[in-house]
Image (spheres, helix red, strand yellow):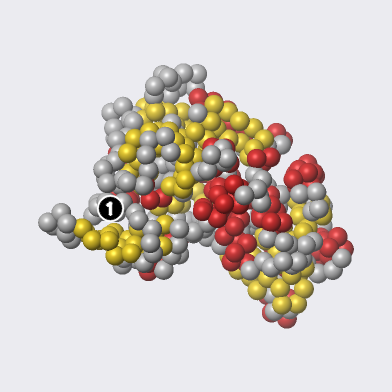
Amino acid sequence: MTVLVSMKRDAISLHVASAFNSSALLSLDDIHIGLFIMPDGGFADTYSPRKILDDPTFRILGPNEKPSSDANIAAFYNPNHEIHLVEKPRPKPGPGQVLLHVRATGICGSDVHFWKHGRIGDSMVVTDECGSGHESAGEIIEIGEGVTTWKVGDRVAIEAGVPCSRPSCDCCRVGRYNACPDVVFFSTPPFHGTLTRWHLHPAEWLHRLPDSVSFEEGALCEPLAVALAGIERAGLCLGDPTLICGAGPIGLVSLLSARAAGAEPIIITDLIQSRLAFAKKLVPGVRTVLIERGSTPQQSAERIKAAADGPLKLALECTGMESSIHTAIYSMQFGSKVFIIGVGKNEQVFPFMHLSANEIDVSFQYRYANQYPKAIRLIAGGLIDVKPLVTHRFKLEDAVEAFHLAADPSQGAIKVQIHD
């Protein structure tokens, strides 16, 4: 007997298939999900990169080589810090899977970091050719056996993190699947990403896009999910004076989310004035503070508190930089919280006694769980407008050029997307 736990929209269902091909659905909610049998190796086996890299049709395109119009092309990086297009086989959906035509994919800072630096921490290391991209939306073009909830032509946002979903996994069973130790997160080495023409995905980790939500907006659900997870875990309440550190893509979607959640006032900081100007255009009521290079965290904190007319109750730290975290800490009132969304170096020093004497809580975030449906509702309902975040658009064939632009701060890009 094979047992699969499937989680969708905060529900957990146990699917049991017996050796006699009979099945039972043990549901903890009234959501019906199609039955499929997960391979014994789990999703890690299903999406093993060796299936692509060892395929005889896989090849790396030369710098000026144009791909054929019907090829399954993708943007890959490698341990030599090269970024290039590849041609890879077109996958065939198996039980419980769908084949997607990926229509829009955003370039994340982590994609650029894997290309340029080859690793994030000690567990995410580029050791071979690896496909990029995890901020994607697309259209279903083929359906595998047992899939009953989707049809060809359906438009979907693609949740990039697919946990093991085994009933023996505590994280999956309680709905905190972002902590699943066996998660397949597309574009995190060794697993290849969704920046490709055709992508194979488990049917149960897709989210329907309303007609009013574009593929471009659907792709932006991924960074929005990061921000929403932070807002939820930080416990932001109506009227909370809030600081957002960093006006990059995550800082800006956090700004949009904090405004929708009723934070007031909101202060946003950055080292680059053009990003603060973008934030002001995005949310006119936000108060901006340019962090002066060479200033101490205490000095920056005094300017932040002056802009806010006093200390703040919550900080959403979106840079992961030690100096920025210190600035956030010194900007807080007694009994407040600094919630760190950004990622930074492995070991950092915090002002321990200032935190202790002021009862300032410091919390962290690892990806997200159960946020995609919320993100889609907020976009469709008009509470969050992510459309202005996309500043540059490229064709899939020009993905390498898109990466070079995204990696160059002087170009002023906020979110670079690749369309097909």
Q: Quadrant of residue 117?
A: top right
Q: Nearer the viewer, residue 134 or 209?
A: 209
The structure residue drawn at horizontal position 76% and vertical position 49%, both measured from the top left corner, is 283
Q: Please indicate whether residue 18 sits to the left or right of residue 128 in the image.
A: left
- Is residue 243 positioned above or below 151 on the image? below
Q: Please indicate whether residue 216 sits to the left or right of residue 80 in the image.
A: right
Report the residue that reaches farthest toward the left: 20
The structure residue drawn at horizontal position 69% and vertical position 68%, both measured from the top left corner, is 237
Q: Amino acid at mark 1?
A: Leu
Image coordinates for residue 128, horizontal then vertical, percent: 40, 40
Write down the residue under mark 1: 35
| Label 1: few (<14), some (14–19) or many (≥20) C-alpha neighbours in 10 Å | many
Report the residue that reaches farthest toward the front: 30
- Is residue 329 positioned above or below 108 on the image? below
Q: Please indicate whether residue 414 sits to the left or right of residue 134 in the image.
A: right
The structure residue drawn at horizontal position 28% and vertical position 53%, both measured from the top left corner, is 35
Image coordinates for residue 60, horizontal then vertical, percent: 40, 27
Q: Quadrant of residue 358?
A: bottom right
Image coordinates for residue 5, horizontal then vertical, percent: 32, 61
- Is residue 367 positioned above or below 62 on the image? below
The N terminus - image quarter: bottom left
Q: Nearer the viewer, residue 34 or 217?
A: 34
Q: Is residue 232 visible?
A: yes
**Numbered disc 1: secondary structure:** loop
- Is residue 74 positioned above or below 279 on the image? above
Image coordinates for residue 390, horizontal then vertical, percent: 64, 37
Q: Is residue 296 visible?
A: no
The structure residue drawn at horizontal position 50% and vertical position 48%, both measured from the top left corner, is 119
Q: Quadrant of residue 49?
A: top left
